[in-house]
Amino acid sequence: MDKMLEVKGKSVEELKDICVTLRKKIIEIVSKNGGHLSSNVGAVELIVAMHYVFDAKKDPFIFDVSHQSYSHKLLTDRWDDFETLREFDGISGYTKPSESDYDYFIAGHSSTSISLALGAAKAIKLKNEQKYRVPIALIGDGSMTAGMVYEALNELGDIKLPVIIILNDNKMSIAKPIGAISKFLSHAIAGDFFQNMKKRTEQILQYLPDSATYMAKKFEESLKLITPGMLFEELGIDYIGPVDGHNVEDLIRAYELAKKLNKPVIIHAQTLKGKGYEIAEGYEENWHGVGPFDIDSGKALKSSDGKRSATSLYSDALSALATENENVVGVTAAMPTGTGISRLINEFPSRFWDVAIAEQHAVTSMCAMAKEGFKPFITIYSTFLQRAYDQVIHDACIMNLNVVFALDRAGIVGEDGETHQGAFDISYLSAIPNMTIFAPRDEKSMYRAVEYAYKHQGPCSFRYPRGSFGDCGDVEDLPFELGKAQLLKEGTSDILLIGYGNGVGRAVKVAKLLKKDGLDVAILDLRFIKPIDVDILEKLSKNYKDWFIFSDSSKIGGVGSTIACLKNDFAWDSVKITSFEYKDSFIKHGNTKLVEEYLEILPEQIVDKIKNCNRE
């Protein structure tokens, strides 16, 4: 590590210079590799002060979501490796203990940090290490919208173990702030008046005789009723702030005070998202996560492939549906732009909502709307719906309500890695009674999928990829019909390629490559995984003996395993099934094509496997 970035023992002016260096490095690398920009440059001083006051070798540094941890990586053991940020076999854009001992826990989803810090504090107490170890959780105000935070605060305020929580309040999550809590943090301080009054009262108390302090202390306590400290101190957690999150000296003073208190403390630091890169400063959602860009202009460098994203197609289809049907409503959880729902929120503000980072609440609230006769479209990333699995079962499926789960980012998502890959939704949803599961394969079928979802009775789910669909060729555009597959092409060989969702495009590409080698294969778009089209599979089993499965999903509990169970149930003894779904491992981060090559699922790799497959 470059010695100039050692922070221990440095003067305030030297720390300021280090902050400038870190900010410059982050902007430089993110402009080349892509990544989380505004959250990282906004948290530089917070993290530099953490490393100055606390011991990163001993104290658990716990970053909520951890997409803001770039400065931490640069200050520990990854200055040289930072060039490989988010690249295949490079360092992760999130904290990752397997990457560095300085990373306490892996993170990629929000609102886990305080629970982790409390668990660490319990362990530290049991190991009798409280004199020289303290857990520090750095959490953004956006993450404070999730219920898990308050479950942790509830226990922390009760058992009062030493935990330091740094609340990075930039008045923004990924998108604009949502909810009463965010508004409370933003407005309750009401400018400098209350803070000045609090400081003035503290000064007066130092000089008053004991006999006069009673009323003064009561006045000081009353100030808490009109400051953000009220929320936390009523929970039994000491409050410090608000502090200027870009003033290293003030932060060091606040951190050192919190460390001396030896009890749960929350430090409320106010920051500017995008600080130091003027183009990104403020409430600019587009600068939260970015691809490569030109630093001077801020313009994206990566050119479009000319294809429309599945997300934009979904947004168009849902907008058209909502225009025609007033009972269509919808929700997303802090990802309005990423899911395409921002357009619907603007067009139909009384019928579409962003409920912040609250997937459980999103699902259950829409279930009540379904019971009242509305048709909710719950639009959430595949990986984030995992956070609301109980609600899907308990509130949607047991009730057999007419709710739609539209799952964006299904399949490999590239540089975000293990915590964000949309690999498991087929597996975890297939086990639930009353759930219908289907998938569009291309642009035309996306519109058909939204159309079908509206008419379907009961809970249903459909998935679609990040980016654009694969090319499925000129095939007949049929409406979705419950449990019915579509045979796209018959073949003269005994090979059947079964595609599901975006896997159909890969199957079509493989079929074209096999055709060049003289193998004419059949292609089936499964369309539904639950219920599955047993009738067509029964017929195809008589003509095609080698079945190859294409789906952007986990192999365990996925499309192939479902069909394999049917093979046993219906005694399709002559059929051999090979699945090209994901193996039983978490998928590393990196360029999507490189990840697919690593997984050996590129069309060229699959063709070689099919040609070398032992076939009777």
Image (cartoon, grey):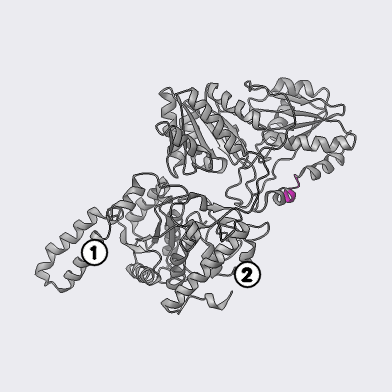
Q: Is residue 599 magenta?
A: yes
Return the residue nearer the eye: 94 or 117: 94
| Residue depicted at 61% across the width and 51% down the height | 417
Do tag 1 and tag 2 residues touch (Cβ < 8 Å)?
Answer: no
Task: Write the start and end of the magenta stretch as one range.
Answer: 597-601
Q: Does 181 sit above or below residue 353?
A: below
Amino acid at the residue labelled 2: Asp
Amino acid at the residue labelled 1: Asn
Find residue 80 and name its label.
2
Going by the image, does 448 lie left or right of 243? right
Return the residue nearer the eye: 91 or 102: 91
Find residue 196 and name its label.
1
Q: Does 89 sit above or below residue 471?
A: below
* Main SS of residues in magenta: helix
Where is residue 319? Give x, y as percent.
51, 30
| Residue depicted at 34% across the width and 64% down the height | 243
Furthest residue to the left? 211
Q: Does 401 sit above or below residue 133?
A: above
- Residue 288 seen in the current view: no
Distance between the Cα atoms at labels 1 and 2? 44 Å
Going by the image, does 606 lie left or right of 305? right
The quadrant of the rendering that contains the C terminus is top right
The disc, 1 or 2, on the residue closer to the chain's N-terminal end is 2
Q: Disc 1 or disc 2, which is closer to the eye?
A: 1
Where is residue 83? Give x, y as percent.
63, 65
Q: Secondary structure at mark 1?
A: helix
Q: Secondary structure at mark 2?
A: helix
